[in-house]
Image: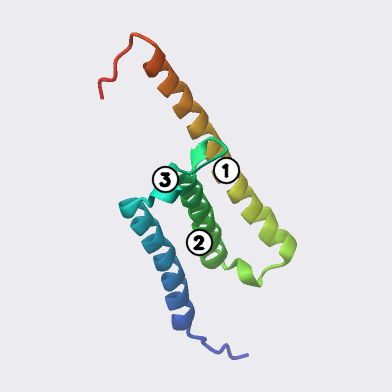
Amino acid sequence: MSHEHVSNIGRIWKVFGILSVVTIIEVVLGIYKPDALHHGHFLGLSLLNWIFYALTIFKAYYIVWAFMHLEGETASLRWSIVSTVIFLVVYLLFILLTEGHYIYGVFKDSTIKWNF
């Protein structure tokens, strides 16, 4: 039984390229903040924030997909892992946005001053 070594250099560069492109898009949008996206609102948040959240979830999905070698597994195993990760990221975003809105309201409407 001989095992043939398969080079994964092309796959590594593909993963690097995809994650780099998504990161560059995030950085460019963060630096320039287009007015149409920054001042447009959807469900209480700017469109730019929604784009950042979508790109973050995509990167988390792709990192799990590529580095845990899920592309060769059965569909049910893939989705049991990936759906858990996506659910936890979305849940974390919900908690952070809810708490951030509450803290903003406390500092905005009370005698407590912003000291940071």
The image shows residue 91, relative to residue 73, as above or below, that is above
* Residue bearing the label numbered 2: 63
Dot 1: element:
helix
Q: Callout 2: few (<14), some (14-19), or many (20+) C-alpha neighbours within 10 Å?
A: some
* Mark 2 residue type: Ile
Q: Position of residue 113 (x, y in %)?
A: 29, 15
Q: Mark 1 points at which residue?
A: 90
Point out the tag, 1 or 3, that comes first from the N-terminus.
Answer: 3
Q: How far apart are marks 1 and 3 (CA)?
A: 21 Å
Of mark 3 and mark 2, the one earlier in the sequence is 3
> Which dot, 1 or 3, sits closer to the camera?
3
Q: Quadrant of residue 19?
A: bottom left
Which residue matches tag 3?
38
The number of numbered badges drawn on the structure is 3
- What amino acid is at disc 1? Val
Q: Hey, which residue is sitting farthest left in the picture?
A: 115
Q: In which quarter of the image is the C terminus?
A: top left
Q: 2 or 111, which lies in front?
A: 111
CA separation in Å, label 2 and label 1: 16 Å
Q: How far apart are marks 3 and 2 (CA)?
A: 27 Å
Q: Look at the image and name its color scheme.
A: rainbow
Residue at the spot 49% in from the left edge and 46% down from the top edge: 47
The x, y position of residue 99, in whole percent, is 48, 26
